[in-house]
Structure formats: C-alpha cells, structure tokens
Amino acid sequence: MRFGRRLLIVTGLVVFLVVSISVFSSLTYFIGPQIRVVVYAYRDAITGIDPSVEFDTGLVVLGSVYEPLFYYNPLTNQFTPALAVSWTKINETFWVFKLRDDVVFHDGTPLTVEAVRFSILRTKVIYDETGLGSGYIWSSVEDIVAINKTAVGFKLKYPAPIDLIASSSYGAYIYSPRVLEYSGAKDLTDKSIRSWFESGRSLGSGPYYIEYYNPVSEIRLRKFEKWWGWAKVGNLRAPDLVVIRIVGDPVTQVVGLRGGSIHIAMAIPKAEIRSLVSEGFKLIRQYTYYSYILMFNTRRWPTSATEFRLAILHSIPWDELIDRALYGYGISGSGIIPYRYPGYIDGLRFKYDLDLAREYLRKAGLEGREVEIEIVITTGYEEEEIFAMLLKSELLKLGIKLTIRSYPWEVVKEYGAAVWRNPEEAPHLIINDWWPTYSTPYDYLYLVRCDSVEWNWSGYCSEELDTLLDTAYELEGVDYEEALRLYEKAQYMIFQEAFAISLWTVIQTYVTRPNIIVRDEAFNPLYMYAILFQYVEVL
Amino acid sequence: MTKYYIKRTLFGASLILGLLVIIYLLVYIAPGNPAYVWAGRPRGPKAVEAIKQAEKELGLDQPLYVQIALLTARFLTGDWGVSIAFKQPVLAVVARSFKATIELLTLSYILAIPLGLMLGIFTALRRGSSIDMVLKITSSIFISIPRFWFALILVLVFYLAGLQPLGRIDPRFSIEIKEVTGFYTVDSALTFRLDILLDVLVRLTPPALVIAVYPLFSIARYVRYSLSERFYEDYVMEAISLGISRQAILARYALRGTIPAVVQLAGMNFVYSFVEAAVVEIIFMREGVGRILLEGLLRSDYPLIVAVFFVVSLTLVIVNTATDVIQKKLDPRVKI
C-alpha cells in the first residue's frame, strides 16, 4: 500500500508541475513583448507567392506585400493611386504612367522604371512561354519604355484599357529587378527566380514583408517601416506583425476567435454569426464579385436538351435561395456577371414555377418518365450542399432523381473539364465558383468560350458567341460603351440557351474580435479574402 | 547482432521501396490531375498548353513504369523534387513539418509511458477494488473517445483557464525565437528564453495529451493485466514466502518481466500516433507531417505524399528496430 501511496504522490506532483507551468506561462504571456499583432484565420493553404506566377490563394499574402500601379474599385468606379500617381492616354496605343518618387522595395532599393518594366515583362513572358500565371492580361503590351526617371510608357499592339489592366488583382505587382542578382538567375524567365520567391522571400514595396512562410500552416508578415504610405494611411495602430494562420475547419475558427487565438476569421459557419455578434464580436460584410455559376452538361442526355435545362431552372426556388443556402449573405444572380460589376444586367433571372417546369419537361419528351441526373459539388462548401439538397427535393416533385456527389475542389475541376473529352463522365450539373482577374466582363464570359476547355464545364460551343465576345474584348480599349453593349448581347444569348447561370454572388463575412477595427479600404472587391492590413487597427 | 542489423536493413529497404511503388500507384489511379495543380489553375488562351507543359515537366507523359522508375531513382539519390501544390522543395517541407510532429509525439510519449506504467501498477495492486473498476471504465472511455472531440474539449478547458493552446508558438514570440534545431522547446531552452519555453510547452501540452491518451491507457491496461498474472506465478509466491518486501518483488521481479513488452507496445503505438497527429495538428492549428499529408492528398501532390510515407515508414522501421534491441537488452531470453 505504501508503494501505491508513493505512486499517487508522484502522479500528484506531475499534475502539480503541469498546472504550475501552465499558470506561470499564462502570467508571462501577459507581460511578454508588447507589439501589435493580428491573427487572420484563412481557410485554404497558400499555393504560391511568386508575384508574376501565382494565380490562386497566394493573393492573401501578396496583397499586403506587393503593390500594383493602381487599385480599382468597380463598386465606386474609382482608381486609387498605388505606385503610380497619375496616367495619361497619349493615343489609343500609348499610355504614360507617372511613378511615385518616394518608394523603396523591401531590400531598400528605390522604385524605378526598370522595375516596372522587369516585373510586367516577366509576368507576360512567363505566360507566353509556359501558360503559367495571369500574364495574358498584358497581351496587348508590345513594349514598356522609360520616358524619364519617374515616367513609364506602355506601347500597345492594339487598344486596351491599360489603366484597368494595371490595377488587376493578379499579375500586376511590381517588384525589384534585383531578384535576378539575389536568385542568381540568368534572365527573367530563369526558374531560380521562382524558387527564390517560393522559399519565402519577398521583394515588393508593400507595407509588410514576409518573415516566415509555411504555406500549409502559417505565414508571418512584418511591418515595413519604410513603406511610403504610412503617413498617408494615418494608422498608428496598424499591426506590427500579421499572422495568416491556415485554419480549414470553420468550427476551429469559431473556437479560436472566442479564445483569442484568432482576431479575424473569414470562414465562420453562417449559423454561428448571430450568436458571436451578440457576444460582442464584430461582423463585417464585404460585397464581392465572387459568384457561383451553375453549368449544365450540354453534351450529355438529358441536359443536352434546352427544354430540360429550362425545366430544371424553373424548379430552383430562387426566392429562397439566398436565405436558405447563404443565410442572407449573398445577392441573387442575374445572367453570368455579378451585381455591380461592369456588364451586369438586372432581370436575367428564371422564376420558380413548377407548372412551367412540367411544361418544359413535356416539351423535352420526358414527362412521366423516370429521369436520373447527377450534380457535382465541392466538399466543405456549405452553401453548395444546401443548394443541392433544395434542388433535389424540388426535382423529386417532377419525378427527376438527382444524385449529389461531393468531391474536393481539384477533383470537381477534373469532372468539369471532362465534358470535352468524355461528356458521359462529366456530371449533368456542376457549380463553378469564379472571381475576376481584372475588371472586365470578359473575365466571366470567358467561361463560355469554345476554346476555354479547362473552364467551360458546360461543353457548349457557339462560334457566334465567341465572335461576339472577341469583338467586345477588342472594343474595350476603343469604345467601352459599345463593348459593354456587346457583352450584354452575349449574356442574353447565354440566358436563352440556358446552359450557365449565376446562382448568387457572395457577401463575404468576416468576424473580428472587439479590439480589431478593419477600415473599409482594407478590402479588395476583386479578390474577397485579401485584406490590406495597413488599414487594420489593433486597439 | 550484426546479422540482425543487416536483415533488418534489407527488410526495411524492401518494405519502403514496395511502399513507394504502392503509394505512387494509388495516387496515379486516384482522381485529380497533378499537372493542373502544378500549372497553377491556368486560365486564358494558353491554359491547355500550360497543363501539357506541366505534364512534361513532371514526367507524367511517360509510361507508368518509367514514372515509377524515375521516382524511385530520384528518391534514392536524395532528389525529392518540389511540392506540386506548395512549390517548395519537398525535403524542406517535410523536414520542417517532421520536426514539429516529432516534438509533439515526444512529449506525448514522455507523458504516456510513465503515467501508463504508474496507472497500470496502481490498478494491478488494487485489482478488483472500486478504484480498479473506476480506472478500468475510465480507460475504456478514453481509448474509444473520438480524438477530435477530446481535442476540442481540451481547447475549451485551456481557454477557460486563460491559456492559449492553439498554434505552435505565441505570434509575439515567433519573431524572437532563434531557430537552432527547429524544435521550439530545445531552441528556447538553448537560448535561455524561459518565457518562450513555457509558452511553447503550454501549446504543446494539450495536443500531446490527446495523442498520449491511447498509448497511456493501452500501456496501463497491459501492465495491469501482466502484473496481475505475474503476482500468482511461483517465483513471486516464493519471494513473498521468503519475506522480500512488496516493493522489491514488484520492482525486481514482476515489473522486470513486463517492461520489455511495454517497450514493444509503445513502439507500435508510436507509429499509430502519426495518424492521430494529423487530426490533432489541424484542430490545434499546428504544423506537422499529418497536416501536410492531408493537404497533399487533397491536391494530388504526389512528391509530397510519397515523401511523407517514406519518412513515416522509415521511422516505423527505426522505431521497431530500436524496440527490438531494447527488448533484447532488457530480456536476455529474447532472440532477434
């Protein structure tokens, strides 16, 4: 028995030790180094940080580390100067941008005309040679030339809205050409530049630089004291350290927010938001251009029949969709282009009408017959799951059995693109979530082109539609109004053929701890998850 | 012994080689296109060309047997390639994560083995009593409890105690710690930063406890059962009749016969703990091998997936060999 007692004492001592360490540590936490820290919980791993190549989630990091020449907000139709202070359109194919003269990159070297030329040409050349990145946005650029020390000229092959292109969310970041030297690269397409960036280094001019980069779990950004904009922003409470923490599980985001490990959360389950707000957390609603587009497989029976597609579209309870699938945090889709984006048309919507749906079903010769179709959705996307469930129950009323298949995004994409090589393998219905690169209607309508075989998951191909889109795109730099009119015409054609329709545009919700203020300027409407942390205040 | 090491090395090498091939085949037949991920979700007129170029760069345009041969050769020569999803050298990604996981598992087993032994001895000495019954039920509950649930409960408990259990280190300390080994506990101790060490330990303890649950209670159950059996064996009875003290009988005779099997049990559990680490790392927002494996699987990142399995299976071979050797040292009757 004495031995047993000793065991108990030892166990008790171990427990005491653990508790003591914990208490002591919690005390040291409060007297630890006092710097302003903000922890942003982001949902996905970061796919890359090469500013010329990255075309996905890396924007969450790049947005605070690099700067374009301008920012453009389509909601307000306003340009905000970034590295350029003004621009002049000399003629249809020549533009001049005046650069700031007080900008330095993270290595201390100044912004030069050569830096602009190097960054943009690298983005363009990489795309031209390999198809990587978003360099196609610069396809109109023939050359970039120095006018003087702070003025840069863009010589174009054909007229293009270069001001809009220069404010793109992807592929328009400027960085120091000294990356050549640091990476030991021979020329701007040398792969060692990409490796240099991806190893976690940055050479931008933004208010933060990368200090630690683990794309799977955590990225730390340090305040760049020499950033030209601190005096202009006037934010003395900006974070000294930004931690972007990858937290895929929404429940963990809630727990982290409540416990204080997370200050800004972007993937809180919608049903939890109300209770968090009642506890004192702040809710931020950001209007985005992030759209969910429903696409029909037009190469597989029965969705190959327009009448059948119309039957399905009239079975969707459109009026309930936003409330039920997005808990009110969204805007109903109309056509393909999202609300308040250039080219948006109001009224390109279908109505929930089961009688009309039955009529279309009869016209398709499918009334009273057993029909089975399938939809593919993305795992973990709560709104897609609810939409699919709603549609399934409505279609049952028409005698149509809908099978819901859920996969990770990469697999969904593969099923979508399968429509071109093997339509029978591709699902009848699929949802494509989409956001723009730069502010042009073409970015959304590109989804329905015949040659967009990686993204046009409907398999629909019309030369007439393609020609219309090409003409509109070419006109953007010459007659923008006429270009918009043609984009509208294209949307009407898509609406009539009923092979793709926007279900909704997301209102992105962020929940923050009470001591965090996020100013309106912190958000980029072109890409919903990138926060400009210089506009965040830590109280 | 030398013969044993040669045998083990050959067995380990063939096991790992076979595993590499099987894993590659599984990734190959699974849905998802690595070339598409490598090309960075291309858009625009050159999207198709980008994917084709990526296929070429990754060698996916080669016949399957060539792909496997190239992969194996690359692995054996130490060229693990670049992660398709994260664009960083696989070796660097795995090394960074492996250190975090090993740090976590080490603390788990520092907690699990002694506590499991103590609990096992304690209940063996009181078998049949109400305390024994309570501990038996408790161990059954803890062994079968869903780990993610237990992890969430621990997070809440730590929060209620005013502690921060999420992440590997306080962000404020993350910019102060000097990385020497990559193990934060060791690095903070080496640089005499007690404040950082304590912060790291507080964040390490709850996930370590979650992982420790299974080995702790399985060791406790085994020790209880094994000791209970041994207490009725002739040599123990004789020792009692000779008036040898209870502690001496337990320490010198009964427990001595139990320890080698406990070492084996801990070794087997250690490998299983890698699986548990995947769940725990995600909930506690920690970096680690389990987490990168999951991310790699979601993105068809086959160089990363194969590398993780390679490292884990290598650990399995090393741990199993080590436990065999330890068992042999502790029990001369054991032949290896």
Image (cartoon, coloured by chain):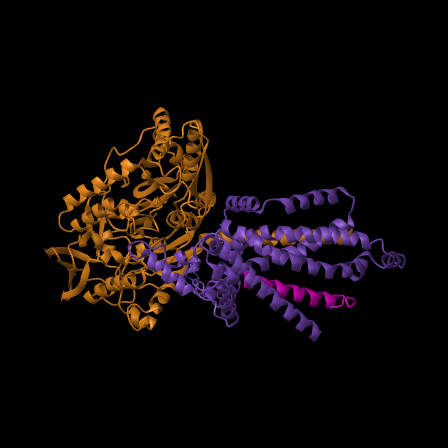
Q: Is residue B330 magenta?
A: yes
Which residue of the protein is positioned furthest toward the top in this rendering?
A355
* Res A117 → quadrant: bottom left
Q: Is residue B12 above or below residue A489?
A: below
> Does residue A236 appear anywhere in the picture?
yes
Which residue of the protein is positioned furthest toward the left in this rendering?
A90
Residue range in magenta is B309-335
Q: Is residue B302 magenta?
A: no
Q: Which chain comes out purple in the rendered image?
A: B
Closest to the observer: A19 or A325? A325
Closest to the observer: A195 or A31? A195
Q: Position of residue A184 (x, y in %)?
A: 33, 73
**Residue B195 horizontal side relative to residue B250, left or right:** left
Closest to the observer: B324 or A465? A465
> Does residue A525 appear anywhere in the picture?
no
* Res B149 → quadrant: top right
Q: Position of residue A373 (x, y in %)?
A: 44, 37
Which residue of the protein is positioned furthest toward the front in this rendering?
A365
Q: Position of residue B19 (x, y in %)?
A: 58, 62
Marks counted in the figure total 0
**Residue A473 horizontal side relative to residue A186, left or right:** left
Predominant secondary structure, magenta span: helix
**Residue A128 horizontal side relative to residue A275, left or right:** left
Q: Position of residue B318 (x, y in %)?
A: 62, 66
Q: Colour of chain A?
A: orange
